[in-house]
Amino acid sequence: MFMTSGAEIERLIQLLAKLPGLGPRSARRVALQLIKKKETLLSPLAEAMAEAAERVTTCSECGNVDTTDPCNICASSSRDVSILCVVEEVGDLWALERAGTYRGQYHVLGGTLSALDGIGPNDLNIAKLTERAQSDEVVEVILAMNATVDGQTTAYYITDKLEQSGVSITRLAHGVPVGGELDYLDDGTLSQALKARQPF
Amino acid sequence: MFMTSGAEIERLIQLLAKLPGLGPRSARRVALQLIKKKETLLSPLAEAMAEAAERVTTCSECGNVDTTDPCNICASSSRDVSILCVVEEVGDLWALERAGTYRGQYHVLGGTLSALDGIGPNDLNIAKLTERAQSDEVVEVILAMNATVDGQTTAYYITDKLEQSGVSITRLAHGVPVGGELDYLDDGTLSQALKARQPF
């Protein structure tokens, strides 16, 4: 084992290598850059991480991560409480927020049902969703799961669960991505786009 | 600006995006992963960074980074003090250490001469190198700069500087990389490998 640069640097590299998208080689590059920019990057990042570790929590209402519980979105008075958008992960919630058109509430499942990985309904934030959907305020639940097998399986399961609550259940539209070229699209997407064609 | 997830998370993402190899998108992915693995990744990494920021320093002898000054390599009694290997950056020193065959001392320049970037001899750790080379202990200086224009310019400049110190100056061999295929090598490397051919 390579140990000429002190246990502290070695430990930093090993932890950095666990981050998604970084391997041992890029972790070393990141560590060197951090050490080089100690004042402007390493110290601020250490502080930001310590603060995040201390303050970030999961919203008990929707499953979003934030420094407050309930989170900023759940606590906001300017958002429509009659619509719930169900997403798999917090990253999906961020993506929808970046798009900037949705003004309702969210519900983060924390994953998808997966027989292969042994993830059942009790491992996801589903009980809370059925509870929220039964509230009188909610009139629509949008299922915004990924268009994967696991995502769609989860969507069907939730549809089943919410049947009796009387809310209207919708899903995101399938179709040609904005800026996309037909020639590069898969057959399934093209068929869906054709079936769901709209008046021009 | 997207600000639904709290200023702390936003700040963490912005700092992560400054790391080499990470952009805004991958920084968000890293931030989510960190928050998800708060106990096993975020907190330890925050601690490791704080400790590195506090303890890591530059060796006043050779320019290496370590938690001690002089660094572990300069302070080691098992290393050959008669050979100095001059490298551009600490990353090059790490690469040579990983190779595991060199048992001498190092000297880190902290970059290369570059007229374009306005980097002159006084911006590099060259004065200290000439001082070290004049010591009676040192008999050989290996120039292990990158085989780039700037690296080789720096090597020539240092050769000039060290001429009067009487040490023998060597450079790394050019040739076919181990595991490399001739067909994919550039002409310059092939010519050098042919010129420097060795008895089999």
Image (cartoon, coloured by chain):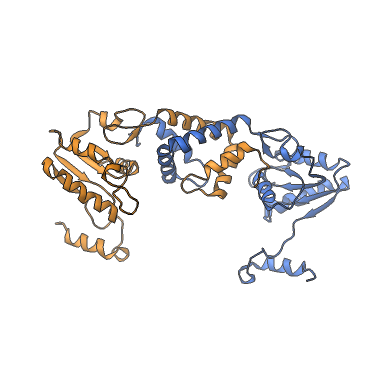
Chain colours: A blue, B orange
Count of numbered circles on the image: 0
Residue A165 sits in quarter: top right
Quadrant hosting residue B136: top left
Q: Looking at this view, is A98 or B42 the one in front?
A: A98
Q: Is residue B104 visible?
A: no
Relative to residue B91, is residue B27 drawn left or right? right
Q: Residue at x 21, y 60 (%)?
A: B192
Compared to residue A186, the image places residue A153 above or below, namely above
Residue at 27% from the left image edge and 48% from the top image edge: B145
Residue A114 location, x and y as percent?
67, 47
Residue A195 appears left or right of B18: right
Q: Nearer the viewer, residue B167 or A116?
A: B167
**Residue B122 image position (x, y, % from top left):** 27, 42
Q: Is residue A174 above or below residue B15?
A: below
Q: Is residue A97 visible?
A: yes
| Residue in view at x 88 percent, y 48 percent | A166
Query: How far from the left and from the top, in percent, is residue A148?
Result: 67, 55
Task: Provide residue B194's location: percent of width, then percent of height.
Answer: 19, 62
In this rendered view, identify the residue nearer to me: A182 or A47: A47
Q: Give residue B111's quadrant in the image.
A: top left
